[in-house]
Amino acid sequence: MLFNGITKKMDSSLLILLVVTIILIVVLSILLPNTFLSLRNFQSMAYQIPEFGLLALAMAIAMMTGGIDLSVIANANLSGILAAIILTQNITPDTAGSQLILIIALSILSALALSAICGLLNGLLIAYLGIPAILATLGTMIFFSGIGMAITEGRGVVGFPDLFLYIGFGKISIFPLPLVIFIIAAFIVGVIMDKTAPGQKIYLLGANPVAARFSGIRNNVIIIKTYMLTGFLAGLSSIIMISRVNSAKVGYGHTYLLQAILVVVLGGVDPAGGKGRISGVLLGIIILQALQSAFTLFGFDPYSKRLIWGLMLLIVMIINFINAKRKERVRRVKKIA
Amino acid sequence: MLNKIPKTNETYLVIVIVVYSIIVTFVNKSFMSVENFFDILRSGTGVAILGVGVLVVLLSGGIDVSFTAIAISSGYIAVKAIMALGIDNLLLAFIISCSIGILLGAINGIIIAYFKLPTLITTLGTLNLFHGLLLTIVGTKSVNAGQMPKCFIRFGAAKLLTFTSARGTTVGLSVFIIPLIAVILLTWFLLKYTMLGRSIYAIGNNMESAMRAGINVAKTQLFVYCYVGFLDGIMGVITVSEVRWVNPVYLVGTELTVIAAVVIGGARLTGGSGTIFGALLGISLVTILNSTLVFLGLSSSWMDFFVGLIMILSIGYTSYQNKIENQRLLIFK
């Protein structure tokens, strides 16, 4: 549970992450007194975090099994396109009431179902055909965007009813609806990973697949479940994404891929699998979003931002490496002593 | 049986390419013409050289997505440098471009070899780093045919052998084929007959065993990425000369298609197996698909669909074979 993690079982790296987050927010508030520390900025951050955060959660789960899912964005695009098509084909300006709600619900469910099926495809390729996760999801990424391109010819599908847009812009008391969805999803995923058997099996599988297999864990089933969940989260993200921009298009959000990996690595997930907490990933998301807002407020152009994300990813991983080496050396010294 | 797998893959590919070409020729007879063949060769050379680089990295058990950023950086900087220096020499252009390529490749190599970071994530980071650096520091202005130094334009237009076709137009085999063949021969020789090349295969197959056999893994990896940078540098000049125009924003974004093509050609991500011939076949298939889908009445939007589908099918096939083989031999990975 997130609560337990913060109060009781917080290990050092998570604590460091929390401290870094707080320091960062303080520093940025000082550097940009009126712009960063404004209700408007926090509100815009609160609206932007969910669609990216769900993708980051999806990536985190896949990476905890020692794999990776490069196809989350393409998956989200495709599911979004499906939802958009259902919405635009069946709704005229005078559709209202229960029929409207029905069609919207249908579009959402279809998107979620499709995204889970795409995740299932990933899982099958990785588990049953033995394709390495990088290649499998690279192939499905190209394949999914290929389907999306073939359907839309590269154009966007536009024009959603206002009730649907409420998902992206609505509020529950003071909280944006997408943020509520995201927090609930993060909470559920955190509980799954920490407290349930499948979650623990994911960790075991990631840490040592061979040992997991010999321990009686059905690797194939776990992998399929993992990638289906990943796909589902991508689908959830796509609903929020398309309702925020009122259109569905191939390629939207493609910059999120690098950022998702960055956030996951920042949050303490080991790309080799087996280690990492959802709470860490959440802190990573907050750090990234804060930096993102700050860069926009500073006026950085998109190319400089890419440079910084790339550089950050490398630096974080190098720091992790040096840290791991240091811990190993300390452990070895302790053994001798 | 393990020996047969690469050969089977390439045989399948040849069959697929031949069959597809025949189908396309039925639809549009001008496909099977020497002119078209030379055209495809000219536009495909750059990608083919990149593909050879990707193959070498895959053989070493890694994956590199930053090569397009290296290629465009090298090419763009070479053009700008020649324009600034005023020395209109193609050889100088190559030297500048390859040096930048080797430098950027070395950055990749050092991070991967000495910090032992996972290759995909590292090169994902350097892709954005290099491209971001190029666009931020060097600029985003494109250089069109009018401003481009003549050496590039001459290189792009030069032909190795020419003849007049039945319609009276001059058709020529571009000189691009010379660097292409040189790269292929060099890489082939390197992989097959040098200790360095054998080390690359060894690391890709099983890094642990390679280390215990005394192979210097770090040095080999460093070499791999520098070599790829070198190849990307060559490609940078070629691509600039081919389209007579360079915009630093372009080229990046195509890396996945190139990797897909090479993997279709049979190179295994798990490293250690794959042939230059296979890689070239994969690239040929994707290049031909690119230019001929239009003939079959499908818009270019369908390209990704087919590439993704073929990729899944071909990797699925080789991976499944590999998995069955591992099960039979009781190898647990």
Image: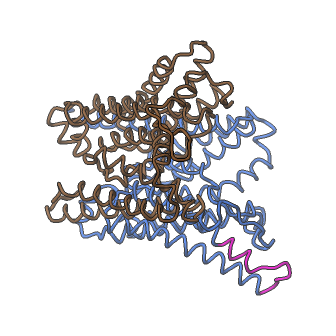
Q: Nearer the viewer, residue B327 or A214?
A: B327
> Is residue A95 found inside the magenta-colored segment of the image?
yes
Q: Residue at coordinates 15% horizontally, 62% vertically from top-left?
A: B330
Whether residue B133 sits left or right of residue B1 in the image: it is right
Q: Residue at coordinates 40% horizontally, 69% vertically from top-left?
A: A224
Q: Which residues are magenta?
A: A83-98
The tint of chain B in the picture is brown
Magenta: main secondary structure equals: helix
Any part of residue A15 in sight: no
- Chain coloured blue: which letter? A
Compared to A322, does A140 lie above or below?
A: below
Residue B185 appears at what percent x and percent y? 30, 33
Image quadrant where one finds the N terminus of chain B? bottom left
Q: Residue furthest bottom?
A: A98
Image quadrant where one finds the C terminus of chain B? bottom left
Q: Nearer the viewer, residue B37 or B276?
A: B37
